[in-house]
Amino acid sequence: MSTLDSGYDNENYVTMMNGQRVYSCGMAPRAFPDYKSDLTDTAYLAANMAEFIVNQTDVNAYAKCTNTCNECSDNISDPVTGDAITTDNYVYVCLNNGQKIYFASQESKKSYLSSVNTMPRHLVESVICSGAPCPDATTITTLSPAAQRFVPDYSIVTASGTTAAPAASSSKIITKSNVTSSDFCTGQGSVMFNGFQTSIHGSCVMLLFKPWVLNSGVKYAFGFIGCFLIALLNETLVKGREVVRQRLLAARKLRPYDKVHKMQCKLTLAVLYMIQMTIAYFAMLVVMTYETGLFLALIAGFGAGFLLFKNLDQDITEERGSWRFTDASTVRIQVEGMTCMKNCGTTVENALKNTPGVTDAIVQFDERAAYVSGSAQYSDLAAAIEAVGFTAEASNQSGRISNVSSRV
């Protein structure tokens, strides 16, 4: 209903499920005694609608809600069932200042009243401030004490104006819309919360795609598992890309001049990269929902992927000579006179490996250095290098000359 004649500008309102609106004033955020942060009146109204419901026992306030349905000509729908509301079937809940929420049956009205004081934003679809979503739309996560104290009045006021006591049966109408909004969360699904929060007993979250609204416990559980698997799949693809790269590299060595094969290899790696980045961006979008449970599922998935696919000792264990990073007996020997790896470096490496007491040896030509592990004396290592025509000096792995080093 339009509220222009009541001092509102119709730019600040709460949209109920299936389209009905409840208007509020457009005041700037202000303090409310039951909450720590300042809030807009619209966000407060959306979260605590029960506080503003007027029962028939409040005769003067209830009299402001005339028993008419001017909005029925606008094809309004029941916020619980989605059924059409007409001048022949309407019933309503009265709000302060004469606003009303209409229902197509007394059962729908009872369903709404029995749940409106159980959670914030019951059957609320959106919260609008000055024509745009309110920044504090989902800030409130608990009902105000006044909303919690609300006691529903089930008296029947029909389109004909008759009033009767409620029927003895208090069975609650169960519909898809009602289960969505009263049993787990409210709303049609938000793609981004205002800061980290959970959708359990709060606003529903939309996971990546419009149909994927996690509006029940089962759907939320599947969403949690799905987010875990997204992160795990990303780590799997990272590992898989590296395995494929290594195999393609080995294959390239057998066909170094085959340009077609080279392009096929690059195309394969590009496709794997695009797939992995798609999964990574899906993970980023999940984080951007700011839904706490889904975020934790992602972190758990990434952690599981690390444990499954990462080497916990060294990421370089497949590198030639990686033992030198973990073997405490390793000594670094600077070798002078080498001009190439194929001849000079291999000659020095073989000479060291053949020295008694040497466990392993490797020459890094770029460093003009050899790394040796085992129990051999430095004098024996130096003699082996000298025997093949080169000179040596020992240092630890940081490059400093050790106490036992001497120029040969």
Image (tube, rainbow, N blue to C red):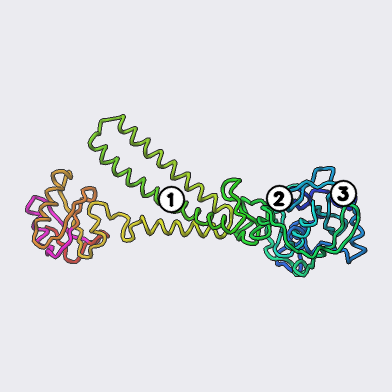
Q: Left or right? Give the position of 105 relative to 183.
A: right
Q: Quadrant of residue 149?
A: bottom right
Instruction: Tell me which residue sits at (56%, 47%) in the image.
Output: 208
- Which label's residue is closer to the chain start, 3 or 2? 3
Please name the residue that numbered disc 2 is placed on: 133
Q: What residue type is labelled 2?
A: Pro
Q: Left or right? Give the position of 399 relative to 360.
A: right
Out of 408 and 15, give the one closest to the viewer: 15
Instruction: Tell me which residue sits at (85%, 62%) in the image.
Output: 155
Question: Magenta span has 394?
Answer: yes
Q: Which residue lies furthest to the front in this view?
A: 168
Question: Magenta span has 186?
Answer: no
- Which label's residue is closer to the chain start, 1 or 3? 3
Q: Left or right? Give the position of 375 relative to 311.
A: left
Please name the residue that numbered disc 1 is placed on: 233
Q: Position of residue 314 (x, y in %)?
A: 31, 58
What quarter of the picture does the C terminus occupy? bottom left
- Which label's residue is closer to the chain start, 1 or 2? 2
**Secondary structure under the numbered disc 2 in the rendered image:** strand
**Mark on residue 69?**
3
Q: Which of marks 1 and 3 is in front?
A: 3
Give the spatial CA distance, label 1 vs label 2: 35 Å
What is the span of residues highlighted in magenta in the rendered image?
372-395
**Mark on residue 280?**
none
Q: Where is residue 70 in the image (x, y as percent from the top left)?
A: 88, 47
Q: Are marks 3 and 2 in contact (CB under 8 Å)?
A: no
Q: Is the residue marked by circle 1 packed among few (<14), some (14-19), or many (20+) residues within 10 Å?
A: some
Instruction: Tell me which residue sits at (50%, 56%) in the image.
Output: 225
